[in-house]
Image: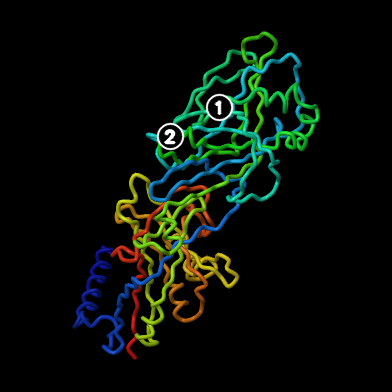
Amino acid sequence: MKFFKLGLLTLLISLFILSSCKNQDGIGLGVEPGNQLDGSLIADTNVVVTNVLEDSSSTNGLVRTPLAYFKDPEFGVTESNIAAQLTLPGRAAYTLTDSAYVVDSVVLVMPYAEGFYGDSLTSKFKLDVHQLNEKYEATTYYNTKTWDYNSALLATKTFIARPHDTLKITSIVDGAADTLIKVRPQLRIPFSTAFINSQLLRGAPAANRASTLAFQNSVKGLYFTLDKAGTTGPGGNLMFQMDSTRIDIYMRVGTNTIDTTMITVPVSQHMASVKHTYSANVQAALNKTSTDGLIYLQGLAGLRAKLEFPDLKNKFAALGSNVIINRAEIVVTARTGTTIPYRPLDKLTLYQLDLAKQRIRIQDADLNDPRGGNGPTYFGGYYNKANGEYHFLVTGYIQDLLRGKTVDYGTYLAPVDPASSTTVNINPVLTYAERTVISGKNSPSRVKLNIIYTKINQ
């Protein structure tokens, strides 16, 4: 009974409150016509876009190391070769445990990494491995480095790229029968037994086994390259996990016909040398003599674009000083017909240069700027397959340009690692080989700067 009375009292109070509101349309604050805010859109299609080469960058220790020979009909030819340093088994002084051993076989093992880009259906690749004539040193190497290597082959293999196909190999089991196991996708290439014997085993100086430095001074390093004449079809860009690349030496004792042991010579350091030979159209874009205005963006430290906004200040000067930027967005559209059969870049980045011509993040991507606190989440740059566009949120950057709080020493659009990150990446990308063609200046799909602003009536 107590609950019934309480419910009746609540109902009566509610009816009293609602009946006191004579005009529901009057709820809230009134807006004076003179103070009303209206959003307007400016679409700046006069963004000047020019092609430039990407900066050189260190390629030491890449997680995904490119090995490439790719004849792209739009861009030209991309080549990437790998230099690597070897170290002793166990990465320490090595002792031969049995003088009666016989080397049964030597296999170079190169695990694939994700990221093949090119034609895997009609292309065949021929990999050649050589000894370096110059020692691989513990120093920083850039993608522009060229190596001197011995012409003699240590290993060679013709293959079809199968970066997702696992293999079954025979695994040695001590004191029991060997067993068949499944291993991750990899290349397995017969390697020179004579080289291993002369550098590490019975034919090598004892000093080579006693000291990593002596071993590396003698070996110098390995050079991996795709044979141009032996690679057929358009080719492609392959990625390898060089940190896991190794030479497996299978040995048996005396006349025993069963492999009894295996020792491994691992890769300790590695780098990639990348070379781009561009098509006539790309070269025209770089020389600013192109007639179609197309812009080319390419991974593997290839191509980027410079953006300029020559009309921006004039457009807003005509509106007066009482203007607020609500939202600014740069829209980049991939040219129709250029995303098949070779897919476009999954992600682009946008950055500016400071007075010293060093790369810095723009305000909307900078975690140290309050407006860029959510940069990795909202800044954008990802490719939208539905409309073929990349979008960047640049409200803070445009505001500061208009107010003179920042100077445009150079704004650049470039390929970037698409992996999610806690910061917006602005470094040259050497682990992704994709490319994108952007519509030219005379196209309705050219680069646009869309700005929504509010003019305050005072």
Colouring scheme applied when the structure was drawn: rainbow
| Circles 2 and 1: CB atoms closer than 8 Å | no
Q: Quadrant of residue 347?
A: bottom left
Residue drawn at 42 percent across, 59 percent down: 284
On screen, residue 84 above or below 74: above
Q: Which x, y percent locates residue 174?
A: 64, 17
What is the crowding at mark 1: few (fewer than 14 residues within 10 Å), some, or many (at least 20)? many
User: Nearest the camera: 395 or 241?
Assistant: 241
Q: What residue type is labelled 1?
A: Ile
Which residue was labeled with disc 2? 232
On screen, residue 100 above or below 263: above
Q: Which amino acid does label 2 sit on?
A: Thr
Residue drawn at 49 percent across, 81 percent down: 404
Q: Which x, y percent locates residue 76?
A: 43, 48
Q: Which x, y percent locates residue 148?
A: 65, 41
- Horizontal side of 409 relative to 338 (left or right) equals right
Q: Quadrant of residue 250?
A: top right
User: Nearest the camera: 87 or 33?
Assistant: 87
Residue drawn at 36 percent across, 81 percent down: 315
Disc 1 element = strand
Viewer can see residue 447:
yes
Q: Which mark is residue 189?
A: 1
Quadrant occupied by the N terminus: bottom left
Quadrant occupied by the C terminus: bottom left
